[in-house]
Amino acid sequence: MHNRLVLASARRRLLSVVIGVTVLFAAVVTGALPPGTASAATYSGYAMAYFTESPNTTGANYGLHLAVSSDGLNWTPLNQNNPVVTPAQGTGGLRDPFILRKQDGTFTILATDLRGTDFTQPNQYIHVWESADLRTFTNYHRLRLHSLNTHSWAPEAFWDASRGQYAIIYSAVSGGHDVIMVNYTSDFVTVSAQQKFFDPGYGVIDGNMISDGSTNYLYFKSTATDALMGARSSSLNPGSFSVYTGAVRPGRGVEAPETYKSLTSNTWYMWGDTYSPNGRFFSWQTSSLSGGSWSPLNDRSYTQPLNSKHPGITPITATEMSNLTARWGTPGWNRLKSYNFPDRYIRHADNVARIDVYPFDPYQDQQWRLVPGLADSAGVSFQSVNYPGMYLRHSNYALVLATNDGTTVFRSDATFYRTAGFADSSWTSFRAYSHPDRYIRHYGYVLRIDPITSGSSATDRQDATFRVGY
């Protein structure tokens, strides 16, 4: 009996050590977070806050939108890509939302108080919400940060342990150009007087902070170069950050950097947003923040929420993700991305099916309901969201958008079977119901059905491969 008790005690101690090592390893793997954030050992996904705009602003909505992702790269909009809460004060709209996980595990949401694109408006206030779980939002108020005749753009916050307070950083004009300002707070109701946090001598906006545990990194947009850059410091003190990276840009102007770490590897990601209202996200990665070198990701690797602008990203637990999805629901529509032209999506234009570069308007032309096949429920049919009585069908092998006339021929021509993607089995190819040797593919950016086999050329196989996402 004594030996069994000793053995049981030893097993408990061993289990305790294994659990402790496992938690420590998970915390190390996922350790790069905003300064002061608690251990990420239990995080298994991300939440993104954003607002929406489209090229001619028909997709503009200046409320708080949310999306979730398990990998931080491919995102599922919640609430049908509609806002989950909308400001009731100030301009009645927001831009640049940011989600802070506070020391007690709950959230504070900060956002610029600005509706639309009139960036000449001075505004001393930002929007603030509290939330226990990102499913309900309470204590909404506007917070005055300064008394200057300037703006308060792109607020973000982090915990400064040396002060025992949260730091709110944002962009405002001082000395004739934009700088990053800071106010300190314990409750997001009252704040200290503003002071200059970072000023390299030229205009800087959209400050975003991350830490690798020993060094703090501040990423920002340089208005002098229209590029993203980084500064770093061993402390969080105002004035202590020094620029250390070269410019990061996708070949055109970019802003709104948002950095976060993979939950499964030693990889950091940075997103950037091109100018409003024609924005789209670009993404880069690095294995070393201290190295300061970022490599662009292929558009094939990531998919932003439809019409999303200026993201704020925070890690969340599996339970939080499940609860968010249950509360807000996932879209009843999909978008389909081209494999070999991943900046293009399937859309209809003048009733012709084609792939076009995102973003575009009408943005609804790229939204499809993948409904049970009209000729065989085991297949799928592509129902237009903005023309719900119309479906993609092939006619003389060309794909067109046409009204369902209820005939057997129409149902047959509008039905396809999902198969593993020819170019990538994790993607999708679509075989025609009525011509089982033919698959949907693009040719000259226009969709048609052609014979495709595993022995077809690499180009043909790539042309017939798509990602079903949002």
Image (tube, rainbow, N blue to C red):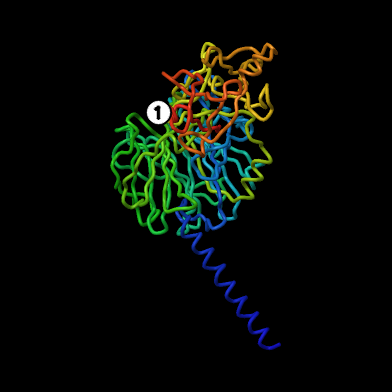
Q: Amino acid at mark 1?
A: Thr
- The image quadrant that residue 78 belongs to is top right
Q: Is residue 246 left or right of residue 418?
A: left
Q: Quick check: 444 above or below 280?
A: above
Q: Quick check: 401 above or below 441?
A: above
Residue at x 33% of width, y 47% of height: 231
Q: Callout 1: few (<14), some (14-19), or many (20+) C-alpha neighbours within 10 Å?
A: few
- In the rendered view of the protein, which quadrant contains the C terminus? top right
The percent coordinates of residue 360 (x first, y second) are: 48, 21
Numbered disc total: 1
The percent coordinates of residue 250 (x first, y second) are: 35, 33
* Farthest residue, direction bottom: 2
Residue at x 34% of width, y 29% of height: 252
Q: Quick check: 215 above or below 249?
A: below
- The image quadrant that residue 49 belongs to is top right
- Between 260 and 461, the one lying in front of the other is 461
Residue at x 38% of width, y 50% of height: 217
